[in-house]
Image (cartoon, rainbow, N blue to C red):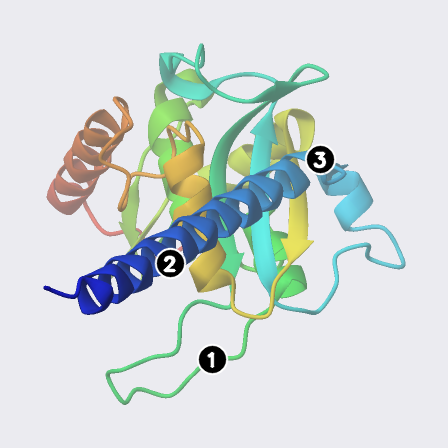
Amino acid sequence: MVSHGHGATVHNVSATATTLSDMAESMSERRRANAVVNFLAAQRYTRAEVFADPCPVPSAAGAYGWWFRDIPGGIDVSGCEQRDGWTLLYVGISPGPPRTDGKPYVPQDLRKRVRYHFGAGNAGADGSTLRKSLGVLLGDQLGFALRRIGSGKRQTFAGGEAVLTQWMAENAAVSWVLHPEPWYLEPKLIDALNLPLNFQENGRNAFAPELKRRRREAAVKAGKMRVLAEWS
């Protein structure tokens, strides 16, 4: 008589492993879905509210979302998240992932990053992916362009930065969620949401290649114009 006990045991172990794997995957999907729901449910704040005293933005790590009333650059937002007249176009994180190139780490948090995007201090397109993208899309409408300034190595919208800040004050709001390692959350959000202004690691978005092209074109044009000694 041939015993089938060993084969049955192997089959049972395999089935159990498959079940556990399916359960883990299901739990992971639920966590991902909950993270997206919580992110979308976070309260939005305008520039005036962000710069109020006390500032509502925490000095902590997390992910933020940028919502807009007016849509820049004729973007198709039919697949974007919309709430109460606001449309979500971009997500970002602060701080970024740990550096691996040995360069010194510049401390960042949600408060510093959000306020910079909103035009705090000497904020410019060279230090904000969001501001550069918005300015490239809005430049013709608002009357400014990307320019080289100072030594010629930096590119900003020069005097147009103040115009962009005012546009954001009227048309942009930001929300956020806390996360100790937001670089793990960001790709999940980009994968789950339609985010036209996130052009990096966002191949599924139809507008991302167009935004890349416009940013590159603006930089080339700036390189052909004279360097501005000061913002003007």
Residue under the point 44% across and 15% down: 79
Q: Along the horizontal axis of the image, is 120 left or right of 18? A: right
Q: In this view, does 183 lie above or below 46?
A: below
Q: How far apart are marks 1 and 2 (CA)?
A: 47 Å
Amino acid type, callout 3: Ala
Q: Is residue 36 above or below residue 154?
A: above
Q: Which of marks 1 and 2 is in front?
A: 2
Check disc 2 and report the residue beneath it: 16
Q: Along the horizontal axis of the image, is 201 left or right of 52? A: left
Badge 1: residue crowd in 10 Å (few <14, some 14–19, many ≥20): few
Q: Which of 121 and 213 is in front in this view?
A: 213
Q: Position of residue 210 (x, y in %)?
A: 21, 25
Q: Which of marks 2 and 3 is in front?
A: 2
Q: Image quadrant of residue 147?
A: top left
Q: Where is residue 64 in the image (x, y as percent from the top left)?
A: 58, 48
Badge 3: residue crowd in 10 Å (few <14, some 14–19, many ≥20): few
Q: What element carries label 1?
A: loop
Residue under the point 63% across and 25% down: 171
Q: How far apart are marks 3 and 1 (CA)?
A: 30 Å
Badge 2: residue crowd in 10 Å (few <14, some 14–19, many ≥20): few
Check disc 3 and report the residue beneath it: 41
Check disc 1 and report the residue beneath it: 106
Q: Where is residue 63 in the image (x, y as percent from the top left)?
A: 56, 54
Q: In this view, does 154 lie above or below 52?
A: below
Q: Which of 99 and 166 is in front in this view?
A: 99
State the count of labels. 3
Q: Image quadrant of residue 34?
A: top right
Q: Can residue 128 be seen in this view?
A: no
Amino acid type, callout 2: Thr
Q: How far apart are marks 2 and 3 (CA)?
A: 37 Å
Q: Where is residue 114 in the image (x, y as percent from the top left)?
A: 61, 53
